[in-house]
Amino acid sequence: MDYEKLLKDHLIKKQRPDLEQIKSQLIRAEKDLQTAESVIPIDLTWSFAIAYHAMIRAGRALMFSRGYLPTTKNSHKTIMEFTGSILGDKYKDLMLRFNRMRRKRHDFIYDSQNHTTLSEATSAIKTAKELVEKIVDQGTEEKQGFWHHKM
């Protein structure tokens, strides 16, 4: 990935990798997945949004592990793009689903569109689990010590 363009556009900034920060994001992503599942009977749209946030947290952990932090400008989109560039073309479909979820979550949060079906909520959780798992696997493959936390 061309980190220099993201740096130049002030979408990311450099930071020293903080192992506790990375671990905290991964643990919270796992808890978000559990919470998303438990909320399905109560609120499908919130279940969807929580699953999406698990993806954001895992993506942040991946960025942190590379020594970068998203800025406030377009942070969710930046996290998604950064994650996709690390995972590569092999996971292009997964990243397309991540992007669709990002847009749908945006509509819910900012436009109060409350239109998630049971199928969408369960699919969102499945997609989030897949992405979180791939991010954890990515760190494990690279033998980075802070990735010992397996889902």
Image (tube, rainbow, N blue to C red):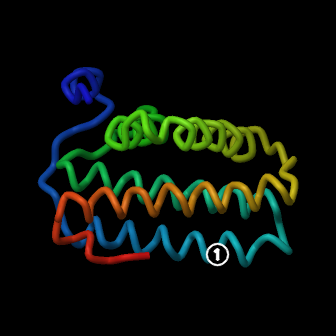
Left or right: residue 18 compared with residue 77? left
The quadrant in which the C terminus is found is bottom left
Left or right: residue 112 compared with residue 64? right
| Residue 93 vs residue 58, the one in the foreground | 93
Instruction: State the image coordinates of residue 78 (x, y, percent, origin top left).
Output: 41, 35
Amino acid carrying mark 1 in the image: Thr
Identity of the residue drawn at 33% across and 39% down: 71
Q: Mark 1 points at which residue?
A: 35
| Residue 93 vs residue 10, the one in the foreground | 93
Instruction: State the image coordinates of residue 65 (x, y, percent, origin top left).
Output: 22, 55
Identity of the residue drawn at 32% across and 41% down: 86
- Furthest residue toward front: 90
| Residue 21 vs residue 136, the one in the foreground | 136
Identity of the residue drawn at 22% across and 45% down: 68
Q: Quadrant of residue 44?
A: bottom right
Q: In which quarter of the image is residue 61?
A: bottom left
The quadrant in which the N terminus is found is top left
Q: In this view, does 6 lie above or below 27?
A: above
Left or right: residue 130 compared with residue 86? right
Instruction: State the image coordinates of residue 25 (x, y, percent, origin top left).
Output: 38, 66
Label total for image: 1
Secondary structure at badge 1 equals: helix
Q: In which quarter of the image is residue 110?
A: top right
Identity of the residue drawn at 56% across and 38% down: 93
- Furthest residue toward left: 16
| Residue 148 vs residue 20, the one in the foreground | 148
Q: How crowded is mark 1: few (under 14 residues within 10 Å), some or many (20 or more)?
A: some
Q: In this view, does 111 lie above or below 37?
A: above
